[in-house]
């Protein structure tokens, strides 16, 4: 009775190979929940694609991609810090490439862990991690195995920004340039104009770019008729009208209905938020579950492993054992089963 992710293997892989053809030097990213597919599966898929380097988010994810059969190089995107015991324990691993974003950390590695493979992160308009290339002591790079400069651009990163930052890094030390969040055409332009090796890290576009190649479904576990005003659920709120309560697999443990905050920059975005607030206040929060061709309201907030969905009218439109579509946020969902067709 699971929440299930089904992958159309041939279509999913075709999208990935098409992108590889457009992006020479592509490095796949496998981090977090593995974009809904899991880190081990993504590591295995990257190996099947013939890639030789993979990127993970944090040092604690290195073992997970290795469990998927990965035996190539692994870039850890989160910058190394001396207080991270797991990351420090990996410094002697010849297949691990660490990211460094502070001059003092670069100096510490050069002093205490000579020969470590390092990428030096340049600060971008993101202002998340990074340093100015002018802050780098060339002598520190001499003591390390310098793998290049890494540039983490904003989501709308521009070729101009990438070019400026790459030029600044290369003025200090020649080496490969690693970027993210460029369009394929902008990346190819950068790749063609630089006289050094280039790589582009890609996660979302690679794994989630063809939405028709995967789908999430949930199982109907129980169906109960209910009358208007009849109490239901943990909190015993009365039903808004006659209809049916459907108990469907998937709940908070799976990340169902989780959403990230969205900046309210436009009138339309604000209107949608206000409308959703009104629905929430009247107990009609729309769920991600689709029954009878449309999304239905939660009868109450999701439970740990299942959700209570309200279907008004004389027909529940689904029976116990039916599979129904569910819209999931792939970067937070944890499905029970993955089927590859």
Image: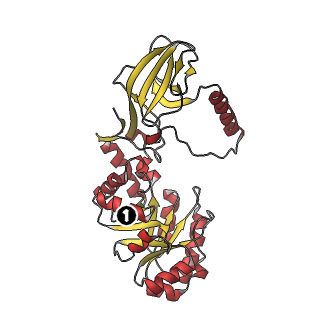
Residue 94 higher or lower than 60, as above or below = below
Quarter of the picture containing the C terminus is: top left
What residue is rendered at 50% in x and 82% in y?
A: 108
Q: Is residue 24 visible?
A: no
Pick out the residue farthest to the right. Answer: 267
Residue 32 higher or lower than 80, as above or below = above
Pick out the residue farthest to the top. Answer: 314
Colouring used for the render: secondary structure
Which image quadrant is residue 97 in? bottom left
Dot 1 crowding, Cα within 10 Å, few <14, some 14–19, many 20+? many
Q: Which residue is mark 1?
A: 62
Which image quadrant is residue 31 in? bottom left
Q: How many marks?
A: 1
Q: Nearer the viewer, residue 253 or 148?
A: 253
Q: Nearer the viewer, residue 221 or 35?
A: 221
What residue is rendered at 41% in x and 69% in y?
A: 86
Q: Secondary structure at mark 1?
A: helix
Residue 198: image location, x then y, percent: 45, 69
Q: Nearer the viewer, residue 167 or 206?
A: 206
Residue 306: image location, x then y, percent: 43, 32
Residue 1 higher or lower than 318, as above or below = below
Residue 234: image location, x then y, percent: 51, 28
Residue 26 higher or lower than 247, as above or below = below
What residue is rendered at 44% in x and 43% in y?
A: 333
> Does residue 292 appear left or right of residue 159 in this picture?
left
Q: Is residue 111 visible?
A: yes
> Does residue 211 appear left or right of residue 137 in this picture?
left
Residue 10: image location, x then y, percent: 30, 44
Quarter of the picture containing the N terminus is: top left
């Amino acid at each position: 009775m699971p929440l299930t992710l089904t992958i159309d293997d041939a279509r999913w892989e075709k999208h990935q190979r098409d992108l590889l053809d457009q992006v020479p030097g592509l490095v796949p990213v496998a981090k977090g929940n593995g974009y809904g597919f899991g880190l081990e599966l993504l590591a295995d898929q990257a190996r099947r694609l013939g890639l030789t380097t993979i990127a993970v988010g944090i040092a604690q994810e290195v073992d997970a991609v290795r469990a998927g059969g990965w035996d190539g190089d692994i870039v850890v995107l989160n910058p190394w810090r001396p207080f991270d015991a797991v990351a420090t324990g990996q410094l002697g691993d010849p297949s691990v490439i660490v990211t460094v974003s502070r001059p003092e950390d670069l100096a510490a590695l050069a002093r205490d862990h000579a020969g470590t493979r390092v990428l030096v992160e340049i600060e971008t308009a993101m202002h998340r991690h990074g340093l100015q290339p002018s802050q780098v002591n060339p002598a520190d790079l001499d003591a390390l195995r310098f793998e290049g400069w890494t540039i983490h651009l904003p989501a709308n990163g521009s070729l101009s920004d990438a070019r400026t930052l790459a030029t600044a890094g290369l003025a200090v030390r020649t080496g490969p340039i690693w970027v993210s969040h460029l369009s394929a055409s902008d990346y190819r332009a950068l790749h063609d104009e630089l006289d050094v090796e280039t790589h582009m890290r890609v996660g979302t576009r690679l794994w989630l770019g063809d939405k028709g190649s995967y789908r999430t479904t949930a199982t109907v576990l129980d169906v109960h008729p209910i009358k208007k005003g009849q109490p239901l659920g943990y909190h015993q709120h009365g039903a808004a009208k006659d209809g049916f309560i459907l108990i469907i697999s998937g709940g908070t443990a799976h990340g169902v209905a989780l959403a990230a905050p969205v900046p309210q920059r436009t009138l339309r975005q604000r209107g949608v938020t206000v409308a959703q607030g009104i629905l929430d206040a009247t107990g009609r929060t729309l769920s991600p579950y689709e029954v009878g061709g449309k999304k239905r309201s939660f009868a109450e907030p999701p439970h740990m492993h299942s959700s209570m969905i309200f279907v008004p009218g004389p027909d529940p439109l689904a029976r116990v054992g039916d599979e129904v579509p569910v819209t999931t946020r792939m970067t937070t969902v944890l499905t029970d089963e993955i089927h590859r067709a």
